[in-house]
Amino acid sequence: MTHPAKLVCRNLWKLYGAIPSQMLDSQQFSPTDDELKKLGVIGAVKHADLEIEAGEIFVIMGLSGSGKSTLVRLLSGLIEPTMGEISIDGQDMLKMSERELIELRRHKMGMVFQHFALLPHLTVLQNVAFPLSIQGQRKSAAEARALEVIELVGLKGREGYFPRELSGGQQQRVGIARSLAVEPEIWFLDEPFSALDPLIRREMQDEFLRLQGMLKKTIVFITHDFDEAIRLADRIAIMKDGHIIQIATPEELVLNPADDYVQEFTRHVPRDKVLSVGAVMEAGADGGGEGIPASTKIYEVASQVVAAGKPLKVIDENGQAVGAIDAQRVIDVLVGNGA
Amino acid sequence: MARVSPKSMIWLGLFALTWLLATFGQGWLEAAGMGWAMQYPDAWVIPLKDSISAAMIWLVEEASFGLFTFTEFTRGISWMIEQPYNLARALLAEGFVEGHGRRAVQLVPPFSWIAVMAGVVALGHYARDWLLAAIVGAAFLYLAVFGQWESAMVTLASVVIAVPIGVAGGLLLGITAYRHPSFERILKPILDLMQTIPIFAYLVPILFMFGFGPVSALVATVIYAMPPMVRITTMALHAVDPEIKDFGVMSGCTRRQMTWRVLVPSARASLVVGVNQVIMLSLNMVIIASMIGAGGLGFDVLSALRRLNIGGGFEAGIAIVILAVAIDRLSQAFAQRATTFTPPPKGDTWIKRHPRSVIVLAILLVSYGVGLILPAVQTYPDAATLTTGKFWDNGVKYLNINFYDQFEAVKLFFLQGFLLPVKRFFLGIPWVWAIAMVTAIGWTFGGWKLALMNLLMAGFIAATGMWEKAMITVYLCGTSVVIASVIGIPLGVLAAVNERAGRIIGVLIDTLQTLPSFVYLIPVVMLFRIGDFTAMVAIVLYAVVPAVRYAAHGVRSVSPELIEAGVVSGCTKRQLLSRIRLPLALPEILLGLNQTIMLALSMLVITALVGTRDLGQEVYIALTKADTGRGLVAGFAIAFIAIIADRIITASARSARVRYGLESANG
Ligand SMILES: Nc1ncnc2c1ncn2[C@@H]1O[C@H](COP(=O)(O)OP(=O)(O)OP(=O)(O)O)[C@@H](O)[C@H]1O
Ligand SMILES: [Mg+2]
């Protein structure tokens, strides 16, 4: 299952501060952290390489100040990189004219903000219709489309409210509706749920997964919450001090953390929800039963395996037996003894 | 005075020397054959006035931008301002007339007074509630009943034109400054300078370019009222949440859409504050603008003052205040309304959605029709007006007859005990010595840059032959500022430490501030007649506000931790004040002093009306003669005094802040 890369960046750098020009001109631009420190330059994003595939949820994750927002602002063209390349659908974004960039944003990109960024003087309906009316759509058409997305995010009946009359969760629903109104292909979300309290946050995550199930956008999602990351992500990029340390599926991160920093993140993860049967089974062994698909998460079959009292057969997507899983392995995962 | 630092010893010595020079210097210098150091010799005066006048004449008569001449340019601007102004004036005050002078025939009358009343009441109700509607209605009713209607409508017409121009101009300049930092870098020092240059410094050139009349008045008003709008716009746009800006970019806004559909609406709350400022400043200019041709209430006050018609001046003055209060309340209510986002009216027809507009329109038409038959509906009948002029005249007469001696005694006491000695002192200092002193002060507080600036500015004043008048200005402002501080700072401190007193003083200060500066002159002239003392009292009344306000703010904003530290170490209340609060509030108090000086200087041209002999008088004479060179040179001299004072005080406030560790030395 290889998708075409939708959004690609190569050797992407964003530095803040006075950078000596001969350093920028040099062929091998790759200053070390120490060199940057000596120059008094802040490296917000350093040497980022990414390939984001069409239709995937790509989560960027890291502690505060690790450069997540800067990276996403680079990818969305809000700021210009110090160095590097970005291409979208194979087109070089840095070579685009002002006009082309505007067209790109009007039709291909949508963004959701941490603090919602709703326009205070517009109603819910007007806020959602705003990006459409910016494109010059007629008011009636824009509002009809806006009503559709408002209904989609479950805010029907509140079109006439002003943002300050809504709760935080509702405001973010407006932000989501607004970003979806133009039917973007790439959807950027910068910590969209961080400003919400935990219960609402979970609800919004479910809502988000429901929407993505229907819409299948290419998504770049930022969070500093690892639980959120593994709940939502197809792949996760972990950032630290401007570097991308590891890009992997949640399961790979748990199984093979690149370093202690990553491992620290994964320590408190409910492993039975991340690991799949395929990663835990004894490969090549025989087992009974009808066969459990290898991609099933452990928590879904834990009680079944334990109750069976014998190894159960594991099959791949073609129905071929690939191994077996027994109660001991499941229990090891549940109590956290290795993989 | 147990220990005096060597530095203060030097300053004390210098001051003593100055005093000696001021008292005996004339004799000594003349004996030494150095009379030139005392009196700036006429032969040395640079004829800058004449050069400027000549340049202005060249500008008006010959200058050309290629496609059009300078005069065509100013005429063009005049024409653009005149059209809407004439319309507003016709609608509100004069009607549409055919012909001129005595043969003029009114084709269509202006809005009837009943219609205007209905309009403002509806505005009040729309902006807030029935209470505001009643307040505004009462204010306008007052104008009608007390016979000020027509003048008030002329004034209103100019405000109605000046405010939108000021707001739009300020908004555009502010937006440009926001978008182009290089433009902001040019604009900012100009705005700073405008704040230190008293208004009337630019009255004369405006008069010369646009001629005596409402257009000049409007131009002056707009120039005066616009700078805060520019500042607030730039600031408000910078303060828009960066996320909102990002959102604008991400929705694919063009620059224009970004400005007008994202930034400006998001900054609405701050922008309306700017609009409010423009309105208040425009009203403040009403009387001064009448010096260069605005009619209406301002002109009534001015001409009454010139004829020393106390009653008439007072009535028109109160009318200005009432108009100002009504407009201020309305604009405040609109400002609040604009930030609380009321949903749009519901209803299926335009008539249902706009009930107030419909009613006002109906009243307008009906009153027009009925007015043709019943003149009282069109114009408030003269017979039904009341006048308080006699009352005030009689009141003044009564006071003057019964308390003449007391007033005279107060006046004499101040004149002889304070004003005259100070005047003699300033006039007695040899100009060479004074310039040296100003330069030395600049050196101590601000290094060689400030020293050089002071030297050049003070030198300019001497070289243009303005020295004596400048010294009278300094003396008049100086004494007023001292008295304003002596009254204002303790009041401010009291307001800060005592809550109840604070509230009363707050109300008092707010009221003083909404009054146009001229109004102060009237009662003072009534009691003390013309002269330096009257000028001083008027200046003090006008300039005391910032002294109070900054002192109160300074004392209030001393960090509570420091106060607690004082309490814990056993300070009495008095010690808390003298050891902790006052010293820490000093920088703020100094800034207040700065503002006080600026306001005092800007009152000068007004006090010229009561016969002072200073730079203000010089500007005033230049105004009446439309002598640009003379007016500009005097204006510059005043501006330079203002700038010298401003820079010295700002520098010393900074060094005080550094001393208390509130700011780093190189920050
Ligand atoms: N405009 C700027 N000027 C200078 N430094 C900046 C600028 N923007 C970001 N930085 C620096 O770049 C680094 C990365 O910031 P960034 O906002 O990308 O972090 P983040 O991971 O999004 O953090 P958070 O979770 O707090 O949002 C920080 O050290 C920040 O101080
Ligand atoms: Mg961030």
Image (tube, coloured by chain):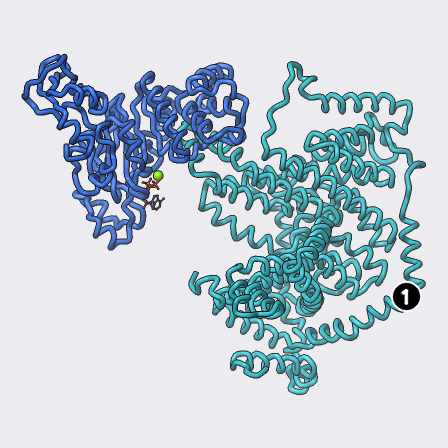
Chain colours: A blue, B cyan
Q: Quadrant of residue B31?
A: bottom right
Q: Quadrant of residue B329?
A: top right
Category of crowding for the residue at label 1, using alpha-carbon neighbours closer than 10 angstroms: few (below 14), some (14–19), many (at least 20): some
Query: Measured along the vertical axis of the image, is residue B220 above or below residue A173?
Result: below
Residue A106 appears in the picture as rendered: yes
- In this view, the residue in front, A43 or B521, is A43
Query: Measured along the vertical axis of the image, is residue A55 above or below residue B139?
Result: above
- Residue at (75, 54) in percent of width and height: B625
- Residue at (83, 25) in percent of width and height: B107
Whether residue A310 sits left or right of residue B136 in the image: it is left
Residue B534 on image: x %, y %: 79, 63
Q: Quadrant of residue A161?
A: top right
- Residue at (71, 66) in percent of width and height: B483
Residue B120 on image: x %, y %: 75, 32
Secondary element under disc 1, as helix, strand or loop, is: helix
- Residue at (53, 59) in percent of width and height: B560
Instruction: Indicate the quadrant containing the N terminus of chain B: top left, top right, bottom left or bottom right.
Output: bottom right
- View quadrant of ligand 2: top left
Residue B633 appears in the picture as rendered: no
Residue at the disc numbered 1: B404
- In this view, the residue in front, B57 or B133, is B133
Q: What chain is tagged by disc 1?
A: B
Q: Is mark 1 within 8 Å of ligand 1?
A: no
Whether residue A151 sits left or right of residue B628 in the image: it is left
Whether residue A252 sits left or right of residue B653 in the image: it is left
**What's under tag 1, amino acid-wise?**
Tyr
Residue B461 on image: x %, y %: 62, 66
Residue B216 on image: x %, y %: 69, 44
Query: Measured along the vertical axis of the image, is residue A108 above or below residue B657?
Result: above
